[in-house]
Image (cartoon, rainbow, N blue to C red):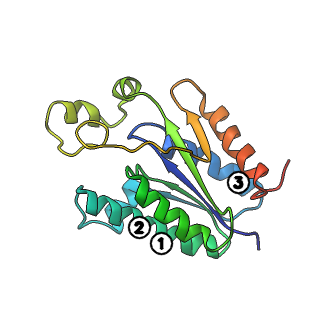
Amino acid sequence: MSSGFTLWFTGLSGAGKTTISSALAPILMERQLRVEVLDGDVIRDNLSTRLGFSKEDRDENVRRIGWLCELLTRNGIATLAAAISPYREARFEVRQRVGAAREGSFVEVFCDAPLDVLKDRDPKGLYKRALAGEIKHFTGVDDPYERPRDPDVHLDTAGTSIEHCVGQVLAALEERDLIPKT
């Protein structure tokens, strides 16, 4: 069984977290890894239904996703978690928890795109609704997002193709010896 790891995709809504993790998963499977994709929206709908969007509830949601990542990583699964996870402290807590299983098994991937691009992209129409006041406590509009200070992988998702972003993540995994080099 291969050793597990967690790729933690963070960034604002629409920045490409789910898109890139979903594009990466079949490539990792082709390399004979067992893979699980944890999408923040799906987790919220199934595991965190009673949580709201206060800082405390957002941190608790991140902790729950982190706990799942820890279990999966410990059991040899390549875990791709795509969650806004707006607060540095909560992301650091997950890094410590997951990384305790094996040094270097947590890789923070920052999906970075300017707010103007995200507003134009707006696949779910959320920015438009948040800016119109229909959605309160929307990260990046009226709630903060604390950008990673030193992410393991920094993806410019506004100016780079999905394929190139996936290639950057694969290169980082190979460099850390988390996957075999091709």
Read off the residue under disc 3.
28
Q: Is residue 169 above or below residue 125?
A: below
Mark 2 to mark 3: distance in Å? 25 Å
Residue 105 in percent (x, y) is at 66, 63
> Residue 100's spot in the image, x, y percent?
61, 73
Mark 2 / mark 3, whichever is N-terminal:
3
Q: Residue at x 63, y 52 (%)?
A: 25
Q: Identity of the amino acid at label 3?
A: Leu
Q: The disc labelled 1 sits on which kind of residue?
A: Trp
* Residue bearing mark 1: 67
Question: Badge 3, how many Cα within 10 Å: few under 14, some, many 20+?
Answer: some
The label shown at residue 144 is none
Nearer mark to the viewer, of 1 and 3: 1
Sequence-first disc among 1 and 3: 3
Find out whether the residues at labels 1 and 2 contact each other: C-beta distance under 8 Å.
yes
Mark linked to residue 63: 2
Describe the element under mark 1 as helix, strand or loop: helix
**Nearer the viewer's eye, disc 2 or disc 3?**
2
The residue drawn where x is 41% and y is 69% is: 64
